[in-house]
Image (cartoon, rainbow, N blue to C red):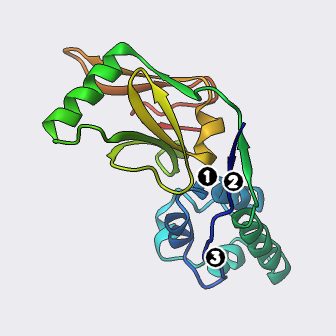
Amino acid sequence: MIKMDKLEAKKITKDMTIGSILEGHPDKAMKLSEIMAEAGLHCVGCGAAVFETLEQGVIGHGFDETILNKLIDDLNGALEEAEVVIEEGEPLDLTDAAVAKVKEIEVKEKKEGYGLRVAVLAGGCAGYSYSLNLQEKPEGSDVVFEIKGIRVFVDRDSVHILKGTEINYIDSLEESGFKFSNPNSKNNCGCGKSFS
């Protein structure tokens, strides 16, 4: 088992916008958005999340201050989790085509030796979207895996959602790009980059 230590995080208040809460805690954005959705606040993927405060979102959806206070407690509780235990083994797989493309991009962008950061973000037309970036070092909350010679950084909230996912690279006359085959997704948007 790999144990992750507690992270220091800025306390969430009712005056913060929904968007800033998620952006301020990228390693826990998935968990925070799930807590909001369970409380009946489904503003995470809409445009209002940028300017609407947590309080405005709760009151605007017809809930009272009791619900708001419980939501704030639940959100801050998620930030204060002492440790997360991640199962051993790789949460995802890269096809040979994906590995070749990542290495090609590393050379092209002069980022040899960087890691591939894979994350699931709140947003997108179906609720969640995938994110791929080349990053020199993992973030404090990332779990690091070695897959076919490539260091892969996965934030701890995304590990369970990505379990069993295969990342492939397709280059054809009709389309090109990284494609995710995730056995945990229920619905996929036609864009191929968003899921629920």
Element under disc 2:
helix
Q: Residue at left 16%, top 41%? A: 110
Residue type at mark 1 is Met
Residue under numbered circle 1? 30
Residue 31 at x, y = what percent? 67, 54
Q: Is residue 110 left or right of residue 39?
A: left
Which three-letter amino acid code belongs to the residue tagged 3?
Leu
Q: Which numbered circle lies on residue 86? A: none
Label 2 sits on residue: 34
Q: Secondary structure at mark 1?
A: helix
Q: Is residue 192 visible?
A: no
Identify whether 170 is placed above or below 45.
above
| Residue 154 x %, y % | 52, 42
- Quick one: label 1 or label 3, which is nearer the N terminus? 1
Which residue position holds label 3? 54
Secondary element at image label 3: helix
Q: Residues within 10 Å of mark 1 (few under 14, many from 20)?
A: many
